[in-house]
Image (tube, rainbow, N blue to C red):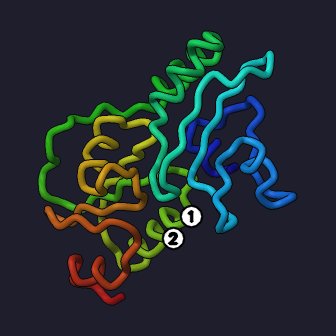
Amino acid sequence: MRAWGESLGGITYPLLSDFWPHGKVAEDYGVLRAEGYSERAIFIVDKQGIIRYVDVHDIDEQPDNELLFRILGELEPVLAAAWAKETAKKEVPQSAEPLAPGVYLYCTSWCPDCKRARVWLADRGVNYQEINVTYDRPSAARLRGWARGNETTPTFDVRGTIIIGFDKVRLAEALNVAP
């Protein structure tokens, strides 16, 4: 939950995760499966306690942050303005067009595997360009195209070979380095 909040730019409003008692919130909201788990479910509740948005989908799917910010912005225009201002500071303009051949790490600042990938690449002396998909939405769209609609990080583009996830063996082969 904290990592997802960080992926949204460090939001400051309350988030709820269904931790204890296990499944109680999911059950109360009608998204707990008989097997004891739920799909990924997002409920946006306004200050009056009214549910204003519901998004339920497969646990492996990344929610569309742009849509969530639009919904939140409709409820709290101040939040939308603050996020837009913060994003503009961090945004690195990118083209939706494919990049020139090279090594690219599509990542986020909060992803644990992205952090490990940076160290792994540095240990092998690999020069690469990092693309933070939290702020570079055209590149995030490119990433979703490769990962069946998901924003899976880290993802690598090694001179046109796309590697979804931190697969050290495939990455080492593509880079011609030791795993």
Disc 2 on helix, strand or loop?
helix
**Dot 2 amino acid type:** Arg
Q: Is residue 76 left or right of residue 98?
A: right
Q: Is residue 58 left or right of residue 127?
A: right
Quarter of the rendering occupied by the C terminus? bottom left
Closer to us: 42 or 31 = 31
What residue appears at the point 51 percent right and 70 percent down from the top-left corner?
A: 116
| Spot occupied by residue 63 in the image (x, y as percentages of width and height) | 48, 42
**Dot 1 amino acid type:** Pro
Closer to us: 61 or 169 = 61
| Spot occupied by residue 3 in the image (x, y as percentages of width and height) | 63, 51
Q: In the current view of this chain or complex, which residue is farthest to the right?
A: 21
Location of mark 1 (residue):
112
Closer to us: 55 or 164 = 55
Closer to us: 76 or 58 = 58
Q: Are marks 2 and 1 in contact (CB under 8 Å)?
A: yes
For marks 2 and 1, give the CA distance. Answer: 6 Å
Q: For residue 166, which quarter of the picture? A: bottom left
Location of mark 2 (residue):
116
What residue appears at the point 16 percent right and 48 percent down from the top-left corner?
A: 99
